[in-house]
Amino acid sequence: MSLTLVRQVEQELMRRSFIPLLLWLCPVALAAQAPGPPPYEIFAGYSWLSNSFNGVPGSRQALNGEEGSLAFPGWHGLRVKIDLAHYSGTNLGAQQNALFIMGGGQYEHTFHRERVFGQALFGDVGMNRYWGPHGTPGETASFVTQLGGGVDTPISRNFAFRVEADWRNENLALIKAVNNVQPYRLPGLPQNFFGITTGLVWLPHADSPAADKGQHKEQPESELTLEGINSFGHFHLFANSWWSYLHVGGIEYDRHSWGRFIGARRDYVAEVLPVAILRQPSATDVYGNRRSRTFESIYGVGISPVGMRLLWLDKKPVKPYYTVKGGVLAFDKKSISQYAAYLNFSLEQSVGVQVRVTDRVEVRGGFEVFHFSNAFMVPSNPGLDSMTYTGGITMHLGRLGENSLLSQ
């Protein structure tokens, strides 16, 4: 009896100790699984830049700063990304205070628990006025390109540790004086920089791998639009010129790739512009100011491979939308100024409404701000901020589903 009683006690103790052990091991085992792609990636951390903006040979000094980014829900590993970075310091007796505002694409892939990504970002860098050697004045803005990548290592279900490296190129130049902004460059004035960034990534509401596998089973909605864009006015925001008018014909492709955002369907957008006509003064100065009363027309083409559309009330007959697109625009002659460039970078933002006509056809119209400039690839960069009206005919692609009038 005593031996049997001892064995029963041992079995009871093992049972009671095994249950807490399971309760402890289950969360650990779940946390050890490779998490699925999170809807959003929100990053904040420290960033190091290899040189000052006035760091000529013999006086190079790195800058310290902060960086933050937001990557939107992805489609097959591709995300739209917005990035902000700030750097400050002093070199050659001049304060360096730079703010990078960039956007672009990020492609990622998961290996075991780590998430590896590459990115291509484009945007603007803003500078304080007196950043040149010994406080000489310089340009306060330039186009910037950033290429790089990194790795995220999970430390919990909703947080990861990030390390990334990148190459950056900008075209900031010095100016002769505040009242004479003609640019010039000192020998050795840097244009290329190397950066290292590290910090924490917040992954809110990460989905499970099983949920991620099932979210792309249905064919996404897509559309093709034949559109026209025509200038009716100008304003000064990123550009100097007032006197040129842009007329564009293009084909836009919209695909529902990224779920919903602030109540709207969020689409990937790409655009081809086979027809671009710019009516500009036949003679200008280096800033694009008119030096003649006659005009000439130059011809070009463009492409905008990176874009996003927000479409509200997407199942209704009348649908408001907002679109942003970025790309390049090339002409057969130098555009805006005879001292500028053939190739320009473009940024389009538009708002409007899309109205259903039949099951498959819709029409749309709206207002668009069309900016293009050469990003200081050459010293003359007048640019153009054009106010335009847009119109187009939209065709729904693939099989008709909930968009069909018969399904209402």
Image (spheres, helix red, strand yellow):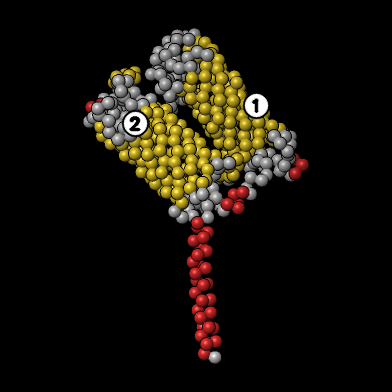
Q: Which residue is drawn at 65% across and 26% down?
A: 226
Residue at 53% across, 76% down? 15
**Residue labelled with disc 2:** 127
> Marks 1 and 2: in contact by CB < 8 Å?
no
Q: Residue 401's spot in the image, x, y percent?
A: 72, 42
**Rendered location of residue 5, percent (x, y):** 53, 87
Please tell me whether mark 1 sits on a helix, a strand or a loop.
strand
Q: Which residue lies furthest to the right in this view?
A: 406
Quarter of the image where one finds residue 188: top left
Inspect the image, locate mark 2, and give the three-letter code of the amino acid beneath it: Met
For the C terminus, the quadrant is top right
Query: Mark 2: which secondary structure?
Result: strand
Q: Name the residue under label 1.
A: 226
Q: In this view, does 168 lie to the left or right of 322?
A: left
C-alpha distance separating marks 2 and 1: 40 Å
The location of residue 147, given as percent across then percent down, is 44, 33
Which disc number belongs to residue 167?
A: none
- Residue in the foreground of this view, choosing between 194 and 87: 194
Q: 82 and 152: which one is in front?
A: 152
Residue, far front: 3
Q: Is residue 99 visible?
A: no
Q: Is residue 407 above or below residue 178?
A: below
Q: Which residue is drawn at 65% across and 36% down?
A: 222
